[in-house]
Image (spheres, rainbow, N blue to C red):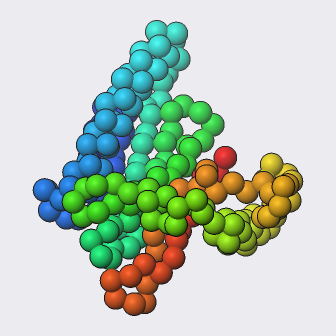
């Protein structure tokens, strides 16, 4: 359950969760990964050729991604993907993506799952922001965004939930979801 490719200009691997070939959700992720690979092949080859012609020894680009289920309930699945992409810079870039959909392959948005005109609710926004502050304090010892303290509510709030990738969390009750995961990319 992977989409993989390797040549002198690119090493690419996307690992998908195990499941049947005809699973519509996994088929969507596979197609998306194959489109990502096609784009990366073209760009990596062009950069490789450009550098080689200029006399620089090119390093191959590298993409590593992995998708995992975060929760399943009531015919709805939630997945989170993490990718590391190196294309010749100082270090690889880390990115996140999420997918929430029905087992039929129909993709859902968070707005489809929340009360109209309350998406995201102020309570959800503040909860995600407070969790972000705690995570940054724990990992980086500083709860800041661009060196400014994180403010979760009011007109000066600076932690935006619209840039977070949202996935569903499992519940301790059968056939239910227990909450949300919010993924923020490093930059």
Q: Nearer the viewer, residue 169 or 15?
A: 169
Residue 67 in view, yes or no: no
Q: Position of residue 110 (x, y in %)?
A: 48, 60
Q: Image check: 163 left or right of 168?
A: right
Count the labels in the image. 0
Q: Is residue 64 above or below residue 78?
A: above
Q: Nearer the viewer, residue 86 or 168?
A: 168
Q: Nearer the viewer, residue 31 or 92?
A: 31
Q: Position of residue 72 (x, y in %)?
A: 33, 74
Quarter of the view holding residue 23? bottom left
Quarter of the view holding residue 9? top left
> Which residue lies at the image location 45% right of the left edge and 69% below the top edge?
168
Q: Is residue 107 above or below residue 180?
A: above
Q: Nearer the viewer, residue 138 or 60?
A: 138
> Which residue lies at the image location 53% right of the left edge and 56% below the top edge?
165
Q: Position of residue 102 (x, y in %)?
A: 29, 63
Residue at the extreme bottom? 173
> Which residue lies at the image location 31% right of the left edge and 42% below the top edge?
32
Q: Image check: 94 left or right of 124?
A: left
Q: Is residue 39 above or below residue 111?
A: above
Q: Position of residue 52 (x, y in %)?
A: 46, 15
> Which residue lies at the image location 59% right of the left edge and 55% below the top edge?
164
Q: What quarter of the picture does the N terminus occupy?
A: bottom left
Q: Image check: 171 left or right of 25?
A: right
Q: Is residue 123 above or below residue 67?
A: below
């Amino acid at each position: 359950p992977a989409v993989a490719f390797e040549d002198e200009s690119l090493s690419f691997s996307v690992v998908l969760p195990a499941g049947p070939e005809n699973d519509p959700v996994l088929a969507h992720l596979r197609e998306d990964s194959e489109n990502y690979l096609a784009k990366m092949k073209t760009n990596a080859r062009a950069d490789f050729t450009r550098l080689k012609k200029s006399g620089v020894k090119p390093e191959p680009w590298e993409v590593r991604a992995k998708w995992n289920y975060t929760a399943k309930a009531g015919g709805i699945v939630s997945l989170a993907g993490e990718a590391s992409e190196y294309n010749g810079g100082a270090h690889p870039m880390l990115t996140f993506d999420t997918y929430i959909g029905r087992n039929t392959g129909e993709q859902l948005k968070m707005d489809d799952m929340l009360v109209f005109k309350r998406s995201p609710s102020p309570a959800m926004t503040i909860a995600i922001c407070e969790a972000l502050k705690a995570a940054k304090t724990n990992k980086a010892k500083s709860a800041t965004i661009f060196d400014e303290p994180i403010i979760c509510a009011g007109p000066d709030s600076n932690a935006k939930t619209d840039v977070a990738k949202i996935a569903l969390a499992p519940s301790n009750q059968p056939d239910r979801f227990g909450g949300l995961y919010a993924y923020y990319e490093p930059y």
